[in-house]
Amino acid sequence: MTSYALGLDYGSDSVRALLVDTADGREIASNVVEYPRWSKGLYCDPSKDRFRQHPLDYLESLEQVVTGLWEQAPAGAAGQVVGVSFDTTGSTPVAVDEQGTALALKPEFADNPNAMFVLWKDHTAIREAREITEAAEAAPINYLKYEGGIYSSEWFWAKAMHVMREDASVQQAAHMWVEHCDWMPAVLTGTTHPDQFRAGRCAAGHKVMWHKSWNGYPPNEFFAGLDPVLDGLRDRLPSETFTAAETVGPLTDEWAQKLGLRAGVPVGFGAFDCHMGAVAANVKPGVLTKVMGTSTCDITVSSYDAIGDKCIRGICGQVDGSVIPGMVGLEAGQSAFGDLYAWFRDLLNWPVKHLLAATESLDDATRQSLVENIEQRTLIELSRAAQAIPPGETGITALDWVNGRRTPDADQSLTMAISGLKMGSQAPQIFRSLVEATAFGARAIIERFKSEGVAVDSVVVIGGISKKSDFVMQVCADVWNCPIDVLDSEQSCALGAAIFAATLGGAYPDVASAQKVMASPVCKTYQPNPEHARCYDALYRDYQALGAFVETGGRA
C-alpha cells in the first residue's frame, strides 16, 4: 500500500510542507506559506540587531501549509501519511511558563518582542555570549570545548540571559526556555508541559551546551555565576536528549483535526534545517553539505574513530547523533550569504522606492508592483554584469561580515568592510566583490575543517541560491577549487525531515536505509576553472589581510 512521509521545514521567512512517497522518494506535493507578522516586519528592529517571531506565525502557518498541501496531493493522501518530522532555524528559543505555554501566547505578553521566539540571526546578546565564553575558559572544565570553544550571540543561553536581563516581566514569568525545533513536535503531541517536555539532540548539543560527559548541561553553579536570572533554569531542562530518528509521541486528536491527518501518526524529534538538509544530501564523512540561503550552514559527519577525542576549534559544535544516528555531526556556517546580496540590493533601490512612494500619480497596487519588479530584476542584472568581469579586475576586496561572523571563530560584533573603491567603481564591480567575499568566507570554513583534521573531499550545496545563480556557484567552485554538486530537490531540508518521518513510520529500518532511496539526486555539477582558481588564491590572501585589519582595529 502507498505510504507518504510529511516533512515540515520552518525557514526564516516561511514554512514549507513536503509530501514524499516512501517507496521511491518522489516528491508528490509541496506548499509554502509566509509568516504574516514577520512579513510586515513586526517585533523586529534591524538597527538594534533584534529579530523576533511570534509563535502564532508558526501555528497559523502550520495549519495553512498542511491543509493547502492536500489540495495538491492525490485524493486520500492525508490518510496515508505514516510519519511527521520538523526542522527549523536555530538557535531560535522562546520563554515558556510553568504550564509550557510560550509567553507571547498569553494576553499580557501578546505584543512583547521579548516574549517571542528569538530568531537565529538576532544578535542582541553579543555581551552575554562573550561573558559565557570567558566563564567557560576560566572554569575547571571548558564547557564549550565541544561547541568550538566560543559561544555565540546566536545561541540559546546568551539569548535567554539577555532577554531576562532586559525584561523583568519575562524573567519572572519564564519557567523554561525551549528551542523552536523542539517546541513544534511538543505542540503536535501535547507534550509542551515541562513535566512531559523532551528535547532533541541537535539543538541541545550544538547550542545549549549539552554533552553526555557532564551528564547533560553544565552545573547550575556555572550559569548562576553568570547571572542570577539563569539560576535554576538548567535544572528545569530535560537532561536526556533524543535523535531525530526517535519519536516524541503520537499526533493528538486536536492537531489531527486541524491538519487533516490521522490521529496517532508518529511525530519525530526536531532538528535544525541544515542538519536535515544534509541528510537529504546523503551526507557522509568527507562530504561537506552547504545550505545556501540568507545565511549558510555547513554540515559534515565523522565516525567515532576518526573524531576520537579531538575538539574542533571555532565551529558550531560536534554532537553525537545530531545529523545521523551513530555518527558525530559537525556544524559551521556564515551569518550572512544571501542576506549580503539583499542588503546591497536594498541599498541601491532605496532612492527608487522612496521616489515611487512619493509619486501621487501612481495607485498603491501599481506602486507595489513596480517596487517588486525592480527588486526582482536588480540582482539578476547585477549578476549578469558582474559575471562578465574577469577575477581580479575590480581591485575591490570585501568582507562578508555584514551580520557578524559565525565561523570560524564566532564574533558577531565584527562588521564588514570594502576596500579598493575608486571613482570608477560601479555597482556590478562592487557586487562581484560581495559575491567573492561570501565565497572566501566559505573557504575559510573549509580550511578550518581541514586544518583540524576533518576531511572535506567534496561539497554538496542545497538551498535557493544554488538553483538561482550560476554566477555565484561558479565563483564558489573557483574560490574553493573543487567541484560542487547541486541537489535536484527544491525543498532539501523538508526532504530530510521526510526521510526521518519515513523511518519513524516504519517504512525503513533506519535513516541510512531511507537515504538510499529517498535522498535527492544531483542535478548539476560546477567544475573549477584552474586559471580563475589560481587568481583567487591571491585574492583570498587579500581577503584574509583585510579581515585581520578589521578584526584588530587596524593594529599591526
Image: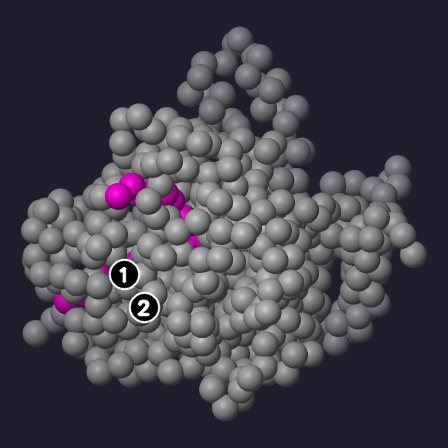
Q: Identify the residue at horizontal 66%, vertical 40% (top origin).
A: 344
Residue type of the residue flagged with mark 2: Glu
Q: Identify the residue at horizontal 22%, vertical 83% (top origin).
A: 509
Which residue is labeled 2 in the image? 240
Which residue is labeled 1 in the image? 198
Magenta-drawn stretch, dominant element (helix, strand or loop): strand
The local secondary structure at tag 2 comes to loop
Residue 182 as seen in the image, left or right of residue 79 = right
How would you rate the neighbour count of disc 1 (Cα within 10 Å): few for under 14, some for 14-19, many for 20 or more? many
The local secondary structure at tag 1 comes to loop
Residue lying farthest top? 360
Residue type of the residue flagged with mark 1: Arg
Residue 184 position, x and y percent, is 28, 52
- Magenta highlight range: 82-98
Q: Report the Cα–Cα distance between label 2 and label 1.
A: 8 Å
Q: Identify the residue at horizontal 31%, vertical 26% (top origin).
A: 108
Is the C-beta separation of discs 2 and 1 under 8 Å? yes
Q: Does the magenta stretch include residue 494?
A: no
Tag of residue 213? none
According to the image, what is the colour scheme of the structure? one colour
Q: Which of marks 2 and 1 is nearer the N terminus?
A: 1
Quadrant holding the C terminus: bottom right
* Front one among 66 and 99: 99
